[in-house]
Image (cartoon, coloured by chain):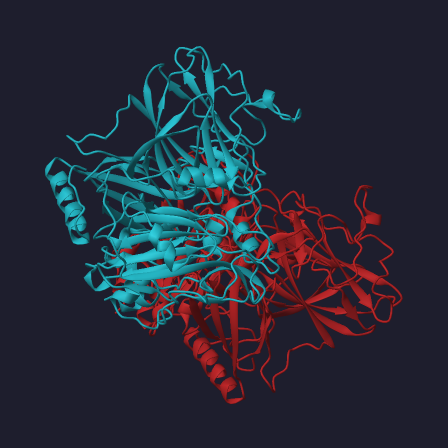
Chain colours: A red, B cyan
Amino acid sequence: MGCKCRDSRAFVFWCIVLSSLIHVSLGSKSRHFKWEVEYMYSTPDCLEHVVMGINGQFPGPTIRAKAGDTIVVELTNKLHTEGVVIHWHGIRQHGTPWADGTASISQCAINPGETFVYRFKVDRPGTYFYHGHYGMQRSAGLYGSLIVDVADGKKEPFHYDGEFNLLLSDWWHRDVHEQEVSLSSKPFRWIGEPQSLLINGRGQFNCSLAAKFSSNASVSQCKFRGNEQCAPQILHVDPKKTYRLRLASTTALASLNLAVGGHKMVVVEADGNYVQPFAVDDLDIYSGESYSVLLRTDQLPSRNYWISVGVRGREPKTPQGLTILNYIPTSASKLPTSPPPVTPRWDDYNHSKAFTKSIFALMGSPQPPRTHDRRIILLNTQNRINGFTKWSINNISLALPPTPYLGSIKFGLNYAFDQRQPPDNYDNSYDIMNPPVNPNSTHGNGVYTIKFNTSVDVILQNANALANNVSEIHPWHLHGHDFWVLGYGEGKFKEEDEQNFNLKNPPFRNTAVIFPYGWTALRFVADNPGVWAFHCHIEPHLHMGMGVVFAEGVHRVGKIPRAALACGLTGNKLN
Amino acid sequence: MGCKCRDSRAFVFWCIVLSSLIHVSLGSKSRHFKWEVEYMYSTPDCLEHVVMGINGQFPGPTIRAKAGDTIVVELTNKLHTEGVVIHWHGIRQHGTPWADGTASISQCAINPGETFVYRFKVDRPGTYFYHGHYGMQRSAGLYGSLIVDVADGKKEPFHYDGEFNLLLSDWWHRDVHEQEVSLSSKPFRWIGEPQSLLINGRGQFNCSLAAKFSSNASVSQCKFRGNEQCAPQILHVDPKKTYRLRLASTTALASLNLAVGGHKMVVVEADGNYVQPFAVDDLDIYSGESYSVLLRTDQLPSRNYWISVGVRGREPKTPQGLTILNYIPTSASKLPTSPPPVTPRWDDYNHSKAFTKSIFALMGSPQPPRTHDRRIILLNTQNRINGFTKWSINNISLALPPTPYLGSIKFGLNYAFDQRQPPDNYDNSYDIMNPPVNPNSTHGNGVYTIKFNTSVDVILQNANALANNVSEIHPWHLHGHDFWVLGYGEGKFKEEDEQNFNLKNPPFRNTAVIFPYGWTALRFVADNPGVWAFHCHIEPHLHMGMGVVFAEGVHRVGKIPRAALACGLTGNKLN
């Protein structure tokens, strides 16, 4: 990203557009894929279960492209009764908002038997992924990796000799349809913690790779011939080299921490943006985030090392996900001699905050506007509606409409959703440190209409949930944009906190957490005509209403493909 | 039905129309229902499971109407990612083919969050039911009863003092999404026999009402306070009275036999048509069928009696479904002193055939045309397609298209489905007594186009399945019509068998079985403009392709509601 885009938002925008055009001229190409989504039997954690797969694969196929390429995915829905969409997480979809893959927002769900063509440009190198964005189909296993390399003739700002891609997820034994019923029950029934953590779709529920280190003598040692679906994907490395680990978390629920026994990691990328390199012993990764870390194979080559993934932020009831870093020519079957790295205590939030606050944009990254044109403060609360447990934002629990917003706004179908905008703030007397005095909330599907090309601050304000002394971590993900993370704070956000915003080198990302009882300040430029979800990336939380919708410059949106509109009120308008 | 409609088909038709009009003038009315379909927790067989319910009820609410009434059901889909439709089984939908509730045939599935209005006339008294007709949603629990009483001022041709309605179904513990995957797996995985049989949605898996009669000492006696979801619905009767039992089977798989300990039953209605009364000790009822029987409470009133339901036609691995006939004032909790009636042996087909062949239309019933204009012979075979196990008809396994036929034919969208008609016959050298020499088959979605107002014979020809010495019972159900069941035979149907057709008093029905290695001859008049499914009512068999589609007089179909067309290629045509 050689061009310096510091002066104005418009310049940033055109700079990106120009740089895309240049990439085209440098040999970027179209990459075509034909995918079929269907349920299939698989053994993600060594137990057989039905998963949602693509072309018979779980996780779905990895897309590998170069910056500037156009991705074309012809997606055929082979499910029997369910619609489907796929969201390309981290891809901003400039000029193709209908390809964002969010049901009820950017497109109609693809009906069984039908095919929808996703066609979009990947304008920037980075570590991305894709996943279902309808009901809880992500949790059902509909996800995969999307890796964008630098364009031909370009270089990454760091060196590495090889790379590995680790897509992290969590897995339940109860199927997602039952999970949905559970979450929608009165009285509420929580789905519980995941049974397993998966690394590239592989975990071990009924055995452990590290049984001999377990305090539980009844845990048996996993024995694999190696071709089992649930056998770990071992990372074979040469000594004295530098490897790039691409990490992405598509968990439904779990906040994770990853460590490599005996090795430090240097963080160099977050959500497709370069960061100032910094070394860590372990790294937190929340659902919706991606990182690249560099790992130097500088340890004793006669041994192998654990790669471990454990749960943060919720009292963990799920065993660590494990795999092995294997130094060639040491046998891959030789187990490490010491136990897997201990995951930091789940409620050691200082550890989490220290990591999160160590992330700064690499010099030369896009810089935020100095000021905001609008500030939206979003209070995150857990609520009740008619006895059902929900999450609400400024006391509105998002219930998506059957007609996707992109079409209904573009065509002025004012009756398609609530025309009142949700509030930009909440009652300042609200006590975020305690359960809500009045937990009642309402369903809503109104939209924040953002003036095109303006600078928007979003302050995510956390609060106490329904139970005493509970405030959870929520990773918020913005579609269609990256935002600058200007700061984090404890307690209630106050206007004077703005003075401490980092306008110099804030990380540029698409996902950011709010910590318990804290706030997180984001800024983005509304430069992408379309309608965009902004939501907690914990799938059950979104299912329970934890999101909002931003619309910007919809009148500038080009011709929406008919297939994206073929439902609800826009379906009626087609001719 | 006082009018005698014997002379011509047209007269039959107008007679029905006129009789409907007369009903209107006699005070028929519209009956409105607002229904929401959603998954919910329930305990159908005392174990908790997710079922598909309506307005929080499983089975769905019973509709009760009078002949000539118009039923209006505003059906809202509250599922999260699945479409839904409801078929009104046995209702012929004259003039409203778009309300037949068959996805891919009569209408587009209703998308999540959307509402479709079913509006149709119930022109004839009888015992009907409704159920899902998309994927395997019937098996998921989407069903209920539809009872049509005689119009005001009319009388049934038999007397009874009271009535009970028993809707029979079978129940699996594996959810239907997994069942669908199972059936679509290579190698094939059969879903197995149901875990429980349900009477009005109630069964007992983990205990038995008749434990003390069980040969298995580990079976425990059910204990109910009475308000349990799975407690049997007890039939409280007065001595020396006559009761009408309305029976309908919406099983996914099981052929059933029902008996009432110590009581004979007199069959008076089949599939909404009166039959010549005949007495039985027990009665076979196949999926898709309904009966009314009269039961005289002429036994010792100091005792109670079992009502038992057991499996026929497949080696049963499912306990009997049970409830109790309770003679008032005997305590309902007093168990019968003898064991429940023994269900006839599953493979005693002579018993089944004797019952089936005892059914004749009541005098005055509509009579069949003397001749046929077209004869379609449908060979039922089990096949393989690319290693997947399927059922085929004349070597075509039905794979429904995304665009419903009713719209695509009406609007001449010739690319919406295979324009070649499936064959009217099969290679006469085919050996029905053995597994197919070449089991390969093909998928297809062509349609039998039937000339309007012609008389059509359908000969259902059974055959050996893929395994040696296996030929199964298949209950075939026709939408939009009743047919006359002209005869049954063993082995391969031959033209000379026509000489033995019963043209005098054949039963007029919507469902008829083929017995193993046999044939069944049906005749119907194609007098109902629309597109109509004709299929094996065993849901997994239909899922595996066991059906055909008839189209007749589609150019005469009135204005199809927009919502029925809002998908696929007809969605694109809307304006």
Q: Looking at the figure, which quarter contains the N terminus of chain A?
A: bottom right
Picture layout, residue B74 above or below residue B212: below
Res. A432 visible in picture:
no
The residue sitting at 45% across, 28% down in the picture is B259
Residue B89 in view:
yes
Horizontal side, residue A382 vs residue B15: left or right: right
Residue in front for this viewpoint, A455 or B210: B210
Q: Percent x, y for residue A98?
A: 40, 68
Residue A165 sits in which quadrant? bottom right
* Count of labels in the image: 0
Instruction: Return the residue nearer the eye: B409 or A268.
Output: B409
Residue A341 falls left or right of residue B342: right
Q: Measuring from the top left, give residue A68's x and y in whole percent.
A: 52, 80
Q: Quadrant of residue B274?
A: top left
Residue B427 drawn at (x, y percent)? 46, 67
Instruction: Classify B402 as above or below B355.
Output: below
For residue B281, side relative to residue A319 (left or right): left
Quadrant location of the C terminus of chain A in the rendered image: bottom left
The residue closer to the viewer here, A110 or A478, is A110
